[in-house]
Image (spheres, coloured by chain):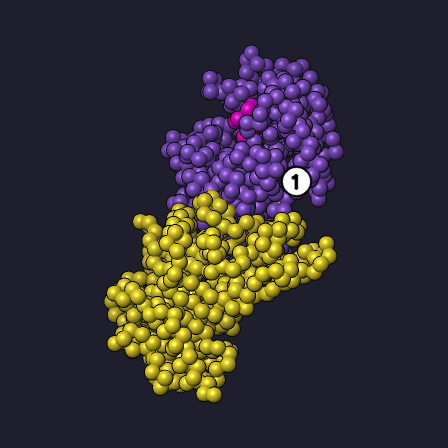
Chain colours: A yellow, B purple
Amino acid sequence: MRLLIANEVDPMLSWVDFRSYSQRLLWFAEDGDVLVLPVAPPAAFLRHATSLTGTDPASLTFLVPPPGRYQGKVIDPYSLLDPAFMDRTAKALAAAPGPTTGLLSCWPSPLVPRYAAALGLRHLVPGAAFIDQGGGELANSKAEFRAIAAAAGVPTAPGAVCRSSHEAAQEIPRLLAGTGAVLVKQAHNGAGAGNQLVVRDDDHRTDHVGAKLLHRLGPGPDAIAHYLAEHWAWASRDDRHPVVVEEFQPASRTVYAEYLAEDTGVRPTATGELDYRERRLVRESTPARGLPADVRQRLLAGAARLAEAYRSLGYRGHLSADAVVDATGRLVFTELNARVTGSLHLYGPIAGRVVDTTSHPGLSVTQHRTPAHWPALDLDDFLAAATAADCAYRPETRRGVLVSLPSVPGVRGGFDFCVVHRDRAEEDDVLRRLDGALCPS
Amino acid sequence: MRLLIANEVDPMLSWVDFRSYSQRLLWFAEDGDVLVLPVAPPAAFLRHATSLTGTDPASLTFLVPPPGRYQGKVIDPYSLLDPAFMDRTAKALAAAPGPTTGLLSCWPSPLVPRYAAALGLRHLVPGAAFIDQGGGELANSKAEFRAIAAAAGVPTAPGAVCRSSHEAAQEIPRLLAGTGAVLVKQAHNGAGAGNQLVVRDDDHRTDHVGAKLLHRLGPGPDAIAHYLAEHWAWASRDDRHPVVVEEFQPASRTVYAEYLAEDTGVRPTATGELDYRERRLVRESTPARGLPADVRQRLLAGAARLAEAYRSLGYRGHLSADAVVDATGRLVFTELNARVTGSLHLYGPIAGRVVDTTSHPGLSVTQHRTPAHWPALDLDDFLAAATAADCAYRPETRRGVLVSLPSVPGVRGGFDFCVVHRDRAEEDDVLRRLDGALCPS
């Protein structure tokens, strides 16, 4: 029996409403586990996910800490130390079957080892000493990443780490000379929400990168100064963090290789690909398909070096090295996430446990967000439509559609679903069927 | 022939008037070297230092970059890239005898590899790739130190790294319970100027630690909140950096062990001791004397582990691990400085080259600041007084007084001098003679 904690990036660094995203924790649940979530799971999603993983939902205990400073939209890490909540946790663990043999937290917060220590479980926190002293922030900073990657001899895009807008003003012109576009990255943020794409002109496509904002520089000599006057405070979060400026790599695919860092070494766990449209993540697929053999080799070798560098620094647990690769096969790493990413539930429990891609390596798991043109619909309606369109996930064929992240009452937007498929044509066919079932013309 | 650069901590992180301190660069000069300084060396100090090191002062070239954003009180690292200054550097290197075979900079600034690259000398910058991407800030942060030390299994005082005053408010009461006093440390600052000592009551001595400010908490339950409301902005530099809070270790000696990190490994270079009076550094001595054998062994072993951790992170060059040891022999590490510290000129050129302590291991080099009760005096007056008191440094005896850091016109305060001595009694005798010569009663 294990204690699973859906804490996300320490909200002191960055936060959004994580109530829906946090529910991916359910994919990891096994019989008897105690789950800490910012909000209790929607009943339909609990039923759906556990029916696929084979976990008995009645055996699970769900704990929601006090809302804390963030209105319960994300776990306030200090809420874990609330005495009444600690007491509830201790009672839940005592009531669960067997001893507590594992602990999974989604972000290496210093509060996790302290919460665990109060429960007598600090020995179950990987890299506890490191994250107790702020190692999680260090290991997840896009700024520190550039120094660590450089020292490890891993290729990155030309770029610099800036501590002030003065430095950025020196570096951006130099970097613009490369491809005519520069990514300005916050040190802490996720899924492209912390990136701005600054372009000199409109010579090339810029629609496929994870950047929240596109800024087209004006023609004058003060264009960069104007940009920084307007955006430096955002990029640095009012000077709280350094800012990365990096030559933009046009016409590139975004891929990742995940590793697990343990006391004994590092080992690869998965690869995948992220597709962006108009600077939003719209599709994520695991494993990464169709990479030339040498590109794949460089992706894995570079990620292994990075994983070993972070392991040597003190981090233990899951980590993901992100990279972009262009049409010529040039591959550069862009960041490292030392946490439970948005991919682990896809390649771990869904691909690994539900689909069993180890035995069926030809299958891919691809996650999509419900498109804006679909009607608002709840999970059961969606699954009914998928069944009607003959594309719901079926254990016998190991293919079809399942819901990977639910919508949560009070949270705007849709939900995420996965297509398990053999090839891109099959995936496209499933998407067409769903579209036809949900938007009959 | 080498290029020596007296840049100090990147002033974007922290700065004071370094014009006097930077002159320690002269101790490192060898025939033909080109030295970059914020201000030209005072003639008397140049004559004094080179007469002791045996360097020909006429063979040296001094370059002062444009004053930049800090009025020339410290080298503005961007001034190194000034085209006219770069041109002057290139010409000086071309005019100096032989090729440029070495480069020493005092702080691992990202601007150093860029300056060196423009001169075709990037290969001479140790760890260039790492520091080019901000590794110097990472390797010199007192906050990141705690995570790296924890992961390396090196003992530190109980403490935490705080990203907001909320976290500090949670941690300080817990830490005060230990010794009744807590050190609040800025992530980037030096020689105790970045520390505040927060004490609960007056139960114990607090006069010997390197803390700029002593804050005695009031009696009420809001005392810590009041302290943080007043001082958090200072401690975090307006939230730019995390803040370390650490249990104060009373009645302790402050010692260090320095290492050199190279591609091939790390090796010990020196030990020393720092004496504080009323929270100011007043005396620094190398090597550290009178440590029990097991304490000395733990100092060196812990420092070696830290040096290896920073080497593995990517840092190359000199580094100093600072520790405090109490009367029971308990030793904890307090910070690591990955730069040319204020000790390297003492144990390097002065002890190593001038005194040759390798052949004369019984000798110590101890640096003092001119005390406030001495009259204002220039270097030649001071040396004349030392000669009159029969305690000027003499190469034949390898003992006596020399000036290690000069006063610089326009900079307030005195200068630093060294006593080379056999034991503490001899040092005290020299200090009495100097006092008698300079303050005849």
Q: Residue at x 44, y 35 (%)?
A: B263
Image vertical order of residue B247 relative to residue B301, above or below: below
Q: Which residue is mark 1?
A: B81
Packing grade of label 1 (10 A; few <14, some 14-19, many >=20) is some
Query: Picture coordinates of residue A252 (x, y %)?
Result: 49, 59
Quadrant into which the C terminus of chain B falls: top right
* Residue B328 lies in the magenta stretch: no
Does residue B254 appear in the picture of this structure? Answer: no
Please tell me in which quadrant of the rendered image residue A387 appears.
bottom left
Q: Is residue B409 left or right of residue B8?
A: right
Q: Nearer the viewer, residue B130 or A32?
A: B130
Q: For the magenta stretch, what is the residue range?
A: B343-350
Q: Amino acid at mark 1?
A: Leu
Relative image position of residue A6 (x, y in whole percent): 41, 67
Figure check: A370 above or below A338: below
Host chain of mark 1: B
B349 in magenta: yes
Task: Find residue B49 and report its horizontal and vertical position in percent.
Answer: 63, 22
In the visual, does A200 lie left or right of A388? Answer: right
Q: Is residue A26 placed above or below A197 in the rendered structure?
A: below
For numbered disc 1, what is the local secondary structure? helix
Looking at the rendered image, the quarter that the N terminus of chain B falls into is top right
Between residue A157 and residue B396, name the one nearer to us.
A157
Q: Main secondary structure of the magenta part?
A: helix
**Where is residue B326 shown, x and y percent of the image?**
45, 39
Q: Quadrant for residue B156, please give it.
A: top left
